[in-house]
């Protein structure tokens, strides 16, 4: 990420989840697009599912699609 203050340029490295619209949004959208939970947890630096779970929102549309995959 690059920021400018007047003519001074500051460059820093920021985790991907901070650049996106929000941690909860990133996690929910990634899950809905089919990204496996372990990959999402690695990107967001979660070690335990218990702490990860508070950021996870499973939408009704996602539940419906998953049920249709399994039961047709």
Image (cartoon, grey):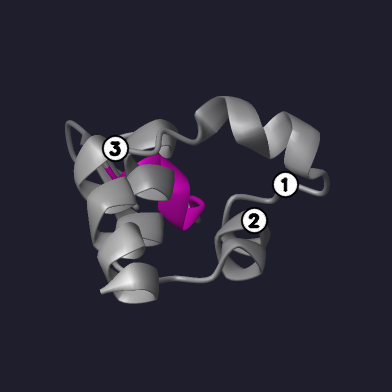
Choose between 44 and 11: the one closer to the eye: 44
First in residue order: circle 3 vs circle 2: 2
- With 33 as the anchor, is 27 left or right in this view? right
Whole-percent x, y for residue 67 in the image: 34, 59
| Residue lying at the far top of the rendered structure | 54
Residue at which label 2 appears: 41
First in residue order: circle 3 vs circle 1: 1
Q: Is residue 10 visible?
A: no
Nearer to us of marks 3 and 2 is 3
Marks 1 & 2, CB-CB < 8 Å contact:
yes
Around disc 2, counting alpha carbons within 10 Å, would you say few (fewer than 14), some (14 to 19), or many (20 or more)? Answer: some
Distance (Cα) linking label 3 and label 1: 21 Å
First in residue order: circle 1 vs circle 2: 2
Distance (Cα) linking label 3 and label 2: 19 Å
Q: Secondary structure at mark 1?
A: loop
Nearer to us of marks 3 and 1 is 3
Whole-percent x, y for residue 3 in the image: 27, 42
Q: Secondary structure at mark 3?
A: loop
Residue at which label 1 appears: 46
Q: Is residue 49 visible?
A: yes
Q: Quadrant of the image for the C terminus?
A: bottom left
* Rendered residue at 40%/58% (across/down): 31
* Rendered residue at 49%/36% (across/down): 56
Magenta span of residues: 14-20
Distance (Cα) linking label 1 and label 2: 5 Å
């Amino acid at each position: 990420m690059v920021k400018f203050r007047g003519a001074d340029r500051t460059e820093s490295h920021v985790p991907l989840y901070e650049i996106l619209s929000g941690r909860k949004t990133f996690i929910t959208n990634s899950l809905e697009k089919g990204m496996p939970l372990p990959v999402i947890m690695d990107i967001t630096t979660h070690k335990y599912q218990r702490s990860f779970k508070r950021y996870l929102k499973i939408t009704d549309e996602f539940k419906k699609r998953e049920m249709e995959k399994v039961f047709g």
